[in-house]
Image (spheres, grey):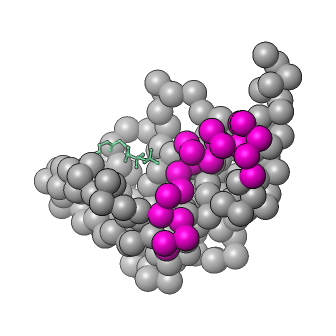
């Protein structure tokens, strides 16, 4: 079995993430989506909610396993015998940090990182920007799967009602 992992925060999953996961799913037998648990950062969605949204929107690909992970990505890979990390590169600005992480991860355990250039349609897209635009009422429906967009709009309304 040829395995790879697509890691990230996925708060929430966007069409840009899905583009990378779909393309990785065609290159590997099994693609693990690793949702990073960051105890220092409270997200818009809980880890369980993020996993459910990813499972729902990637079910069509047929070879995706979605899991949370706490700690080093290289340990997640080692425990599952995953030799490759697949990441999207949106622009040159992503490159510095991604190169550092790829080199660090390779130095730690020998795990390889493969970069896929994101589709130009999504080169500006990030979960952070989507949340910000949506929270000010901007239309981000074309940047998210329909179900994720609906949940995001609901969550923003819930948060507003609590304030
Ligand atoms: O969606 P993000 O926030 O860009 O994802 C970054 C993520 C989660 C992929 C990266 O921070 C990560 O792999 N964190 C796990 C902890 C780790 O292995 N850190 C050392 C990286 S060299």
Which residue appears at 73% of the width and 46% of the height?
138
26 in relation to 139, above or below: below
Query: Is residue 133 visible from the viewing direction of this image?
Result: yes
Residue extending farthest to the bottom is 26
Query: Is residue 105 visible from the viewing direction of this image?
Result: no
Q: Quadrant of the N terminus?
A: bottom left
Q: Quadrant of ligand 1?
A: top left
Magenta region includes residue 134: yes
Q: Which residues are magenta?
A: 119-139
155 in relation to 56, above or below: above
Which residue appears at 44% of the width and 38% of the height?
70
Can you give x and y, in whole percent of width and height, for residue 25 in the image? Answer: 51, 77
Count of marks overlaid on the render: 0
Q: Quadrant of the C terminus?
A: top right
* Front position in the image: 48 or 89: 89
In the displayed structure, does residue 151 sit left or right of residue 7?
right
Can you give x and y, in whole percent of width and height, for residue 133 in the image? Answer: 66, 43
In the displayed structure, does residue 105 sit left or right of residue 28?
left
Which residue appears at 67% of the width and 38% of the height?
45
Residue extending farthest to the left is 107
* Front position in the image: 131 or 19: 131
Can you give x and y, in whole percent of width and height, for residue 14 in the image? Answer: 61, 58
* Front position in the image: 5 or 18: 18
Can you give x and y, in whole percent of width and height, for residue 61 in the image? Answer: 63, 77
135 in relation to 14, above or below: above
Magenta region includes residue 117: no
Which residue appears at 32% of the width and 54% of the height?
93
**Residue 64 occupies quadrant:** bottom right
In the displayed structure, does residue 160 sit left or right of residue 112?
right
């Amino acid at each position: 079995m040829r395995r790879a992992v697509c890691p990230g925060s996925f708060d929430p999953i966007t069409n840009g993430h899905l583009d990378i996961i779909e393309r990785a799913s065609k290159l590997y037998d099994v693609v693990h989506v690793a949702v990073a648990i960051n105890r220092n950062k409270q997200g818009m969605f809980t880890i369980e909610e993020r996993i459910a949204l990813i499972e729902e929107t990637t079910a069509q690909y047929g070879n995706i396993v979605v899991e949370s992970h706490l700690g080093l990505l290289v340990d997640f890979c080692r425990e599952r015998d995953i030799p490759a990390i697949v990441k999207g590169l949106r622009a040159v600005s992503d490159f510095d940090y991604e190169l550092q992480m790829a080199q660090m991860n390779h130095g730690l355990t020998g795990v390889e990182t493969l970069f896929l250039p994101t589709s130009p349609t999504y080169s500006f897209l990030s979960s952070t920007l989507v949340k910000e635009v949506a929270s000010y009422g901007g239309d981000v429906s074309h940047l998210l799967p329909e179900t994720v967009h609906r949940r995001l709009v609901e969550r923003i309304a819930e948060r507003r009602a609590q304030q």
